[in-house]
Image (cartoon, helix red, strand yellow):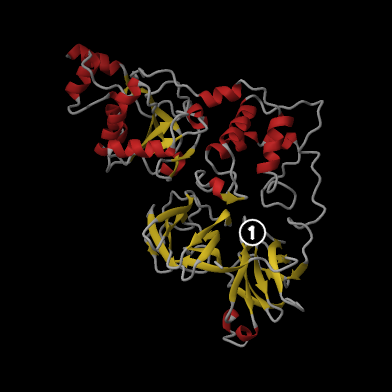
Amino acid sequence: MIKTLVLLAGLIWCAGASATTNQVPDFALIDHEGRFHQLSRYADQRAVVVFVYSPDCEASEAGLPEIISLRDRFANSPVQFLVLVPDSGETRASLAGLAGRLDSETPFLLDSSQLVSEALGFTRSGEVLVINPARGDILYRGGVGLYKGDPMQQALAANLPGMSSHLHYVVHSVLRNDPFIDNPSQSEGEPLVLDKIEAVRAQTISYEEDVAPILIDRCVGCHQKQGVAPWVMDGHRMVQGWSSMIRETLLTRRMPPGQIDYDYASRYEDVHHISDEEMQILMRWIETGAGRDESAEDPLAMLTPNESEWELGEPDLVIEFPEHQVPAAGVLDYVFVPLEIGLTEDRWVSAYAFDVDEKSALHHVIVYTQDARQQRQNASRGGSRTNFGGYAPGRGHIELDPDTGILLQRDMRFMIQFHYTTIGRELTDRTRLGLYFHDSPPAHELERTAVMNGEFVIPPGVREFPVTAKTVIPDDSYLYSFAPHMHYRGKHIRFRAVYPDGGEEKLLSIPNFQHNWQMVYRLREPVFLPAGTEIIAEGAFDNSRFNPLNPDPTKEVRWGDQVWDEMFLAWMRIGTAR
């Protein structure tokens, strides 16, 4: 026994020794239940354990129960267990079934692009990474190492009673900040097959033919002059210079912004979505140096700016908003301004767009209508009014379904709500609204309604504070779009319909809500909602110090107008069924 312990002592490794040389990139994926997981968002944990699973690998199948057992054993400890599944034959539904059969809440992350598995350097099924999530340091890479009675394992088991595997021993040591043996148990799993990655690697990737078209389709809309993005994709050199950042934003799903759960992407128009194949092409191009054929024309440099400064072309009517002076500092209240529309006849709006002058300071604009009766009622803070639409970052223009419209009566005026935030310098904002009209009345008139909850109180420091809101649709209607709204602490939100017959339908999920991108999600096909249908919104706030946008994790947070307060609501466009 003494000789064995001497041998063990000679193999001891201090858990932080290779922190600066052995790291993994940040990454994000959605699990089998639609929940978003990002490595860096687990910075409050001492370790994140990632186990790569393939259903046809015996070692992988043998190691999975140990992962689940360890997750249960360390349920109250600062360690997170994740099962990574890059197998191209698996689906979200099949993984949900597997989790159900195992009766486990362990997150199963479907790596449908296989890019995360490659970035983490996995080569065999059943392999494990133990990562310090705050820095991305690899603390352990190897197999699960189920104890089977070899001398080393017997020695560890004798000195550490109750240990079931080498991974158990490693996690136990990391949590205690103890040194552990630098003798990783080799994975006995089959070589990991990343067939989708290999298929892309077998292709010749051309910047001109493959990469630029993806950038034009997915990115240039924001990354252009006067766009909302911080840099302009105006040529290959610029993109090449930002290529490492592009890689990071793809691995963490930070771009394209405002992404919905990709299982819902096919149901919605104009969503900010990028396919697995498109990501694989971009990543392969970056991996090989992000070069181009210098003898060919650069598609990005050949792009010509829109003839109109309006995203949807020249409007039928432009509403000039009053000039606003924004001070360098201070807290600014909402401002309400009445504006005449000047219509001589009723018109049906098919789309609208905002030409925002100072995007850095204009937090939002909400446009309301007031008919003659509303203009005479309750003039305080905007008075009686009906919600028409609005602007928020990521929501610069709205196109309605071709057979729908918003009615503007000739006796109406606009009541505009402005909310500015100070940015450290004085500025003047001159924003405009452009209206686009139908030539004839559409089949369906759209109204705006909301599902909201303003009664929550978010405690300081809480990472996951759930909030629910409900509303009942009184008449047979069609649902056309959602516009969810939360502030800095908004974490995720999803919507479902509960029908009068008891049936349910999942409508939309935004697993990683981002305050800077207040999007409108428009259904390709409207959803029929019988009278009495209940729309339920379920979401959560992150008021912890690990939320990078949180202005003050020590503060109790309630509903309020300012961005450091919170809101939980979603505007919906509906039309009465006829």
Q: What amino acid type is highlighted by mark number 1?
A: Asp
- Label 1 environment density (alpha carbons within 10 Å; few <14, some 14–19, many ≥20): many
- Quadrant of the frame with the C terminus: bottom right
Can residue 27 be seen from the camera position used here? yes
Estimate the x, y position of residue 577 in percent, counting from the top left.
Answer: 54, 66
Judged left or right of residue 104, residue 569 is right
Q: Who's the residue at 38% across and 53% down the image?
A: 464
Q: Is residue 19 left or right of residue 103?
A: right
Write the residue at 50% across / 27% down. 118
- The x and y percentages for residue 245 are 61, 37
Please give the residue where the numbered disc 1 appears in the rendered image: 401
Residue at image coords 79%, 38%: 301
Residue with the most extreme bottom position: 376
Picture quarter containing residue 147?
A: top left
Instruction: From the viewer's side, name the closer residue of 45 and 327.
Output: 45
> What x and y, as percent, mark residue 399?
66, 59
Q: Nearer the viewer, residue 328 or 291?
A: 291
Which residue is at a point 52% across and 43% down the rendered structure image? 262
Give the image location of residue 249, x and y in percent: 57, 40
